[in-house]
Image (spheres, rainbow, N blue to C red):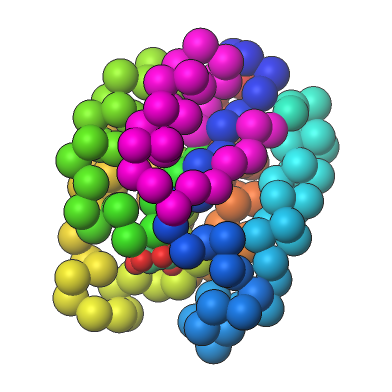
Amino acid sequence: MSGTIGILNGPNLNLLGTREPELYGHETLADVEKLCRDAAAAHGFDVDFRQSNHEGVLVDAVHEMRETVGGIVVNAGAYTHTSIALRDALLTFPGPVVEVHLSNVFAREEFRHHSYLSDIAAAVIVGCGPLGYRFAIDLITARWS
Ligand code: DQA
């Protein structure tokens, strides 16, 4: 597997740390990026860490990552519940995709219970906060590298 893991973050995740901290915690996206870099480095991997508020930018990122990364960790934010385009893009990715959500989406509003990504993901990790990203990286490196 490629020595790089792609980490894709969707809309509003740039506001982590100040956005609804009772739900998402006080750690910023920069903290999450550092956690991911450290977790990947522990297994000898690099990360390509991205965030966008725009659906098409996330789709383009998946297209790029088809050529450059071995696995993808995706927290698509609200696009999880709406985006067939992101689902279709991820379906073209040949490696494992692990879906992560900081919060336990199943303990929240009903519209968050449906994901366009879960049934095409190799694994889904919810409700673990930023640690979920680490678990996803550990899983990808342990199972597919
Ligand atoms: C989220 C859950 C989504 O429902 C929400 O729209 C987000 C964050 C999470 O990490 O818990 O933006 O993906």
Compared with 90, 73 (above or below) is below
Closer to the camera in the image, 39 or 92: 92
Closer to the camera in the image, 36 or 1: 36
Judged left or right of residue 103, residue 129 is right
Image x and y of residue 136, in percent: 55, 45
Q: Residue at x 29, y 37 (%)?
A: 86
Judged left or right of residue 69, residue 17 is right
Compared with 71, 112 (above or below) is below
Q: Quadrant of residue 39?
A: top right
Residue 96 shows in the view: no
Q: Quadrant of ligand 1?
A: bottom left
Judged left or right of residue 4, residue 51 is left
Residue 71 counted in the magenta span = yes
Outermost residue toward the bottom in this view: 22
Residue 60 shows in the view: yes
Compared with 74, 110 (above or below) is below
Closer to the camera in the image, 57 or 44: 57
Per the rendered image, the range of residues in magenta is: 47-72
Q: Quadrant of the C terminus?
A: top right
Image x and y of residue 38, in percent: 80, 44
Q: Quadrant of the N terminus?
A: top right
Q: Residue at x 57, y 32 (%)?
A: 6
Q: Residue at x 68, y 33 (%)?
A: 47
Residue 58 counted in the magenta span = yes
Compared with 82, 26 (above or below) is below
Q: Residue at x 62, y 79 (%)?
A: 18
Image x and y of residue 87, in percent: 25, 36
Count up the numbered dots: 0
